[in-house]
Amino acid sequence: MPWLDPGMADEEAAGKDQGGRPDLDDELDRLQARLPYRISLFVQKVRSPAVAPYRIPAGIALTLGGVVGFMPIVGFWMVPLGLAVLAQDVPVMRPPLAWFLAKINGKRNDPSSS
């Protein structure tokens, strides 16, 4: 876990690249470390290179399914999940998702936010 290494700079420990922008892989690692074990395993499988051919169709399906969120079972919760899955393979979507995850991870790790 790179953010626990005491020899790292503060920016690197917070999951940021050299320009001070959050790095998606580091932020996903931080989030995954806080998830329950089984969910963490599932996230690791989705992030693995072996499932790369299936991620874009799954991300598109989740996003489109979220558009019809008024229907039972499918819902608006599918849109951010679909965008997160797409961001693994679509470079343009990585910085906004990394920024969003950095905000979530920062709020969760900040003791003054509770």
Image (tube, rainbow, N blue to C red):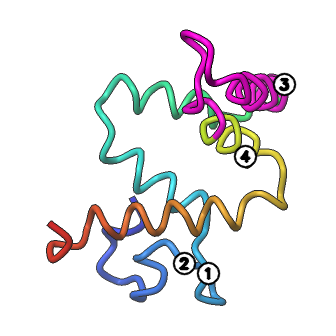
Q: Main secondary structure of the magenta part?
A: helix
54 within the magenta span: yes
Q: CA distance from mark 3 to mark 1?
A: 28 Å
Element marked by disc 4: loop
**Where is residue 111 drawn, in percent x and y?**
15, 72
> How far is disc 4 from disc 3 in space, using C-alphas?
12 Å
The reply to whether discs 3 and 1 touch (Cβ–Cβ < 8 Å) is no
Please name the residue shown 51% across and 33% down the image: 43
Task: State which quadrant residue 93 falls in.
Answer: bottom right
Q: In this view of the protein, which residue sits in the foreground, 93 or 13?
A: 93
**In the rendering, which numbered label is found on residue 21?**
1
Q: Nearer the viewer, residue 66 or 22?
A: 66
**Tag 2–tag 4 contact (CB < 8 Å):** no
Where is residue 100 shown, x and y percent of the image?
55, 63
Image location (x, y in percent) of residue 58: 76, 24
Residue that carries the numbered disc 4 in the rendered image: 88
Q: Which residues are magenta?
A: 53-79
- Mark toward the start of the polypeptide (3 vs 1): 1
Q: Residues within 10 Å of mark 3 (few under 14, many from 20)?
A: some
Quadrant housing residue 82 = top right
Residue 39 on the magenta segment: no
Asked if residue 84 lies left or right of residue 9, the reply is right
Do callouts 2 and 1 mark residues in contact (Cβ within 8 Å)?
A: yes
As measured in the structure, the alpha-carbon distance from the residue carrying label 2 to the one carrying label 4 is 17 Å
Q: Of marks 2 and 4, which one's residue comes earlier in the chain? A: 2
